[in-house]
């Protein structure tokens, strides 16, 4: 019997009606994921909203400005009720602690500057939650991330968001091809965040004017050190602030209070030239400072690479791409030399300042929007 090819492809890429297409929407309680869920429900899809409880619910209730807190769970549930689709809250607190929070604390103690939002996407949202979506017999999972999934000649590709100011590709570089086949990002093509808020108002969502989250969800007010001290009591051991030339300039209350490239709050005033943190020596409990030019880095070792190119990563001796070494930096031209399937040396054509272990190095198409994956900076060059 011949296949019926008359069924049109729906907006999520399936050859069946929206009503027969189940999509799990990861709902943080914010305006972005709420709009995704409302929009897909409005199109007639079989929407199932899922919100993750990632850390202590009681402590979260009083905290504003971060996703997945108690009030956000309430907001996600209310949107689901308003739009008439089922909503579930899953307790992922232990998974989140093991996969994200513990590494965050240990990375800081090792003198690195971690990016827990990437680990959360990689190890929780796009791993455990994605498997839950499959268990719910979903055809795909949608999120409110600002990034685009486009079909290329060799399958789905990851591309930067249309709105460069909202682009979240830096935080999603570790999305694997298998995950990308199952994921959808309905907001990536929008021209601005204002367009999202207009959609929220159009659907009458109670979160239409809700402020964006600013902090890491488990770090109140951006105070990393207090969170680390709570997780690892006694971790903030005092030590010396030392100039790169060997001079002892002062004392500090713990290496965890400092990051590479930091200038303000060093507590060593009275010097004629500005100094920056150029190295954190955890073993000797020293914060090493120096002039700005010492921050310039040209060669970066990268590991745990997730490669999204069409040809194998090691199929050629070098790749001429652009890279981001911080989420707030524009891509810079670079040569990526594979050392193995998941390790590489990245040479920046123009040196960057403040390159720090623990940050991601994300690979981009030279002048285009495609993301070719990336990896983790693992030691100072």
Image: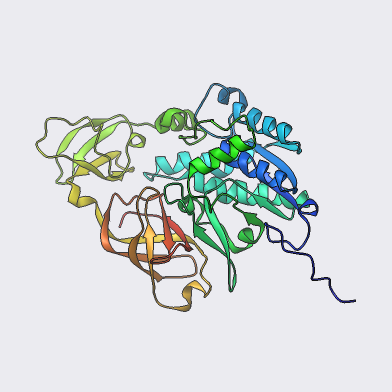
In this view, the residue in front, 15 or 68, is 15
Which of the colour schemes (rainbow, by chain, secondary structure, one colour) is used?
rainbow
**Which residue is located at x 51 percent, y 26 percent?**
64
Residue sitting at the far right: 1
Of the pair 210 and 155, the residue shown nearer to us = 210
Residue, far bottom: 316
Q: Quadrant of the N terminus?
A: bottom right
Camera-side residue of 260 and 369: 369
State the residue at coordinates (41%, 60%): 302
Looking at the figure, which quarter contains the C terminus? bottom left
Q: Where's residue 97, x and y in %?
A: 57, 38
Q: Is residue 319 visible?
A: yes
Give the answer, above or below, for where 42 lies relative to 350: above
Q: Is residue 223 above or below residue 165?
A: above
Q: In this figure, what is the number of numbered marks?
A: 0
Q: Splitting the image into 4 quarters, where does residue 99 fall?
A: top right
Would residue 168 appear left or right of 275 to someone viewing this image? right
Asked which quadrant contains residue 179, the reply is bottom right
Residue projecting furthest to the left = 272
Q: Is residue 146 left or right of residue 45?
A: left
Percent coordinates x, y for residue 293 in the rendering:
18, 51
- Where residue 203 sits in the image (x, y, percent)? 64, 37
Residue 54 in view:
no
Left or right side of 107 for 59:
right
Q: Which percent across, then down, holds residue 127?
A: 63, 51
Instruction: Identify whether 380 is placed above or below 255.
Output: below
């Amino acid at each position: 019997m011949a296949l019926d090819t008359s069924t049109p492809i729906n907006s999520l890429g399936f050859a069946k009606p929206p009503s027969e297409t189940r999509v799990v929407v990861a709902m943080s309680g914010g305006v972005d994921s709420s709009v995704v869920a409302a929009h897909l429900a409005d199109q007639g899809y079989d929407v199932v909203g899922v919100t993750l409880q990632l850390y202590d619910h009681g402590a979260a209730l009083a905290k504003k400005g971060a996703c997945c807190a108690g009030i956000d769970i309430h907001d996600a549930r209310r949107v689901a009720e308003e739009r008439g689709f089922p909503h579930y809250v899953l307790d992922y607190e232990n998974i989140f602690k093991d996969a994200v929070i513990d590494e965050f604390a240990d990375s800081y103690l090792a003198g690195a500057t971690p990016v827990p939002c990437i680990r959360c996407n990689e190890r929780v949202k796009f791993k455990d939650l994605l498997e839950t979506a499959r268990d719910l017999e979903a055809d795909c999972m949608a999120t409110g991330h600002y990034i685009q999934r486009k079909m290329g000649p060799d399958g789905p590709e990851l591309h930067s968001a249309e709105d460069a100011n909202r682009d979240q590709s830096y935080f999603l570089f570790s999305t694997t091809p298998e995950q990308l086949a199952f994921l959808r990002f309905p907001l990536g093509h929008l021209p601005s965040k204002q367009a999202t808020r207009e959609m929220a108002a159009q659907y009458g969502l109670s979160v239409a004017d809700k402020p964006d989250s600013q902090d890491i969800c488990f770090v109140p007010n951006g105070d990393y050190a207090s969170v680390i001290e709570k997780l690892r009591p006694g971790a903030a051991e005092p030590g010396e602030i030392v100039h790169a030339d060997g001079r002892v300039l002062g004392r500090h209350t713990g290496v965890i209070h400092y990051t590479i490239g930091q200038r303000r709050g060093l507590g060593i005033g009275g010097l004629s030239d500005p100094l920056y943190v150029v190295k954190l020596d955890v073993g000797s409990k020293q914060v090493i400072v120096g002039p700005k030019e010492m921050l310039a880095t040209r060669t970066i070792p990268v590991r745990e690479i997730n490669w999204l190119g069409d040809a194998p990563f090691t199929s050629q001796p070098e790749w001429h791409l652009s890279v981001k070494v911080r989420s707030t930096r524009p891509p810079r031209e670079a040569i990526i030399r594979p050392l193995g399937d998941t390790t590489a040396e990245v040479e920046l054509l123009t040196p960057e300042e403040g390159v720090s272990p623990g940050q991601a190095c994300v690979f981009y198409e030279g002048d285009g929007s495609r993301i070719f994956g990336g990896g983790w900076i693992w030691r100072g060059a």
